């Protein structure tokens, strides 16, 4: 039986990390390699377990793998915040490693044959919880790997992204088993014929199903003409210090190029109104009448525009409530979507999925002093206010989901908006913080998965990055390029039918959390029972 020596274990871990990186969108985009990327790490873990080495070895090797994965795929965070990047790399790698360590512990308690499959439940449970908690950073969910290949994952309309993660994990475990038995245990490959067939079926049957869905699916709903703007305003040197009037001029001039009498919506990017104002006083600020005046050129259109807003409260409402200096009461700041509807009436929805370190300081409700660590990238910093639950806008009989930046990677959040009647998904964002890196490309590609999950057309307005239109199959039908001014017009179909995923969200994640918890507790029981006997 072949055994890894110490050097070979580290080389295998290095290989696993590199395979994860080059599988991911825009850091290699070799998505099929994700089916084997975890195999070297699984082999290392198994060798450590079989040779009864200290479990701390598993931690070291797993951390190396996941640190490479985090840095190699999201290094571009450094451009926005070096401190934030280091925290993301270190903490997210640690969290992933702890999940792998829990799997190792559970496997030791339950035995090899059954224990390896607990990896699936532990990891899917982790990815689901990573969408929910204070340190949420689900960018690297394994299912996101296929965002550039929507024709392979049309069944996300049933499972969501977690279905893709399940696909990846099962393929890795079957591949691990084949390699371990044939190469390490020197077993005749004929004894693994059944597992080889299972692996082939596991990979190619979902692909076949997806291709059939992709070819046969016909887009649902009525046509809606939309114009998106990309003003290309430098977020570091112009957006929060330059003339607001000039910036709005640019956005409105871009919209004028393409709007027609049929245009139902005009989209402008996140924080296009970069100064903070009280929402109940919006009609008194100088820029509101100006927008209404310019909007008159688009007679039947609704304007969706990003804004930095605030609200006053007599009493503290949430951890985002800040005491007003020198006066009574509290105020909350928001990263908002502002709609000026076809009747020129304003309304607001606040961003609810906040960026760590910039818009939200995790656990600051428990440790208020942490608010002093907020990263200021212009505009409002510190923990922002959020909605109590997901919200939608309705204008002229059309309901849509306003999605601000980071919210677009939260599948279940957008599914909730679609359950509330959203027929279209509008993403407004500012991806200029990351400069010309894989970051803004990955961000756009994840929106393609939201289109598939809910069978909704997506219109995306970026300050710079990629503004685009995505159809219900996840195809990009029109797109801008980096660091250029753009005005794009396209027709999307608005769909009110609900997919299985729209109705039930991350049903898989919820059930896997429960199963992994039961398995973990059972493993603890077995180890305690074994020691007592």
Image (cartoon, rainbow, N blue to C red):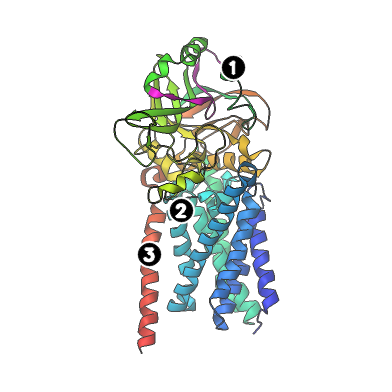
Q: Residue at x 54, y 25 (%)?
A: 272
Instruction: Specify whether residue 91 is painted magenta.
Output: no
Mark 1 residue element: helix
In-front residue for pair 117/404: 404
First in sequence: mark 3 or mark 2? 2
Say whether residue 289 is visible.
yes
Pointer 2 residue: 130
Q: Residue at x 61, y 60 (%)?
A: 67
In the picture, the quarter occupied by the C terminus is bottom left
In the picture as drawn, the residue positioned furthest to the left comes out as 315
Residue interval drawn in magenta: 251-279
Say whether residue 422 is visible.
no
- Dividing the picture into quadrants, the one containing residue 396 is top left
- Dividing the picture into quadrants, the one containing residue 64 is bottom right
Tell me if 460 is positioned left or right of 32 in this view. Answer: left
- Dividing the picture into quadrants, the one containing residue 241 is top right
The spot of residue 314 in percent (x, y) is 29, 31
Work out how far the residue at label 1 is from the one at label 3, CA to CA, in angstroms: 53 Å
Pointer 3 residue: 515
First in sequence: mark 1 or mark 2? 2
Work out how far the residue at label 3 is from the one at label 2, CA to CA, in angstroms: 17 Å
User: How many other residues sit within 10 Å of disc 3, few (<14), some (14-19) or many (≥20)?
Assistant: some
């Amino acid at each position: 039986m072949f055994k890894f020596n110490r050097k070979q274990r580290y080389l295998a871990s290095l290989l696993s990390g590199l395979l994860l990186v080059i599988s991911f969108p825009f850091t290699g985009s070799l998505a099929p390699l994700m089916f084997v990327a975890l195999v070297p790490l699984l082999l290392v873990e198994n060798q450590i377990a079989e040779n009864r080495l200290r479990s701390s070895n598993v931690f070291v090797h797993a951390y190396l793998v996941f640190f490479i994965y985090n840095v190699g795929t999201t290094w571009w965070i450094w451009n926005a915040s070096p401190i934030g990047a280091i925290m993301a790399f270190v903490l997210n790698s640690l969290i992933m490693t702890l999940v792998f360590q829990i799997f190792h512990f559970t496997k030791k308690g339950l035995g090899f044959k059954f224990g390896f499959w607990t990896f699936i439940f532990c990891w899917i449970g982790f990815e689901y919880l990573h969408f929910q908690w204070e340190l949420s950073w689900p960018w690297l969910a394994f299912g996101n790997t296929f965002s550039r290949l929507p024709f392979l994952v049309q069944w996300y309309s049933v499972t969501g992204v977690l279905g893709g993660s399940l696909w990846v994990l099962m393929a890795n475990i079957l591949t691990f088993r084949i390699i371990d038995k044939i190469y390490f245990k020197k077993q005749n490959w004929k004894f693994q014929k059944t597992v080889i067939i299972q692996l082939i079926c596991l990979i190619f049957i979902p692909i076949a199903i997806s291709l059939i869905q992709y070819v046969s699916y016909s887009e649902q709903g009525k046509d809606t003409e939309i114009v998106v703007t990309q003003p290309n305003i430098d977020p570091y040197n112009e957006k929060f210090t330059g003339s607001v009037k000039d910036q709005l001029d640019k956005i409105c001039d871009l919209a004028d190029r393409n709007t027609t009498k049929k245009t139902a919506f005009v989209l402008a990017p996140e924080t296009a109104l970069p100064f903070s104002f009280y929402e109940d006083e919006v009609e008194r600020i100088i820029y509101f009448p100006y927008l209404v005046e310019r909007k008159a050129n688009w007679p039947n259109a609704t304007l969706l525009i990003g804004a930095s807003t605030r609200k006053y409260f007599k009493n503290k409402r949430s951890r985002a409530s800040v005491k007003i200096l020198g006066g009574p009461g509290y105020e909350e700041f928001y990263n908002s979507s502002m709609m000026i509807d076809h009747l020129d009436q304003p309304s607001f929805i606040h961003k609810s999925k906040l960026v760590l370190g910039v818009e939200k300081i995790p656990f600051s409700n428990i440790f208020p002093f942490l608010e002093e660590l907020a990263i200021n990238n212009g505009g409002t910093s510190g923990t922002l206010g959020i909605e109590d639950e997901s919200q939608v806008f309705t204008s002229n009989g059309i309901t849509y989901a306003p999605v601000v930046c980071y919210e677009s990677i939260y599948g279940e959040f957008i599914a909730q908006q679609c359950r509330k009647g959203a027929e279209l998904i509008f993403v407004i964002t500012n991806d200029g913080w990351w400069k010309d890196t894989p970051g803004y490309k990955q961000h756009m590609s994840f929106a393609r998965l939201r289109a598939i999950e809910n069978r909704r057309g997506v219109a995306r307005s970026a300050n710079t990055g990629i503004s685009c239109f995505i159809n219900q199959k996840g195809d990009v039908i029109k797109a801008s390029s980096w660091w250029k001014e753009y005005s794009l017009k396209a027709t999307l179909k608005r769909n009110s039918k609900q997919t299985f995923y729209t109705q039930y969200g991350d049903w898989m994640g919820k059930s896997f959390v429960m199963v992994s918890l039961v398995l973990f507790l059972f493993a603890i029981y077995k180890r305690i029972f074994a020691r007592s006997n």
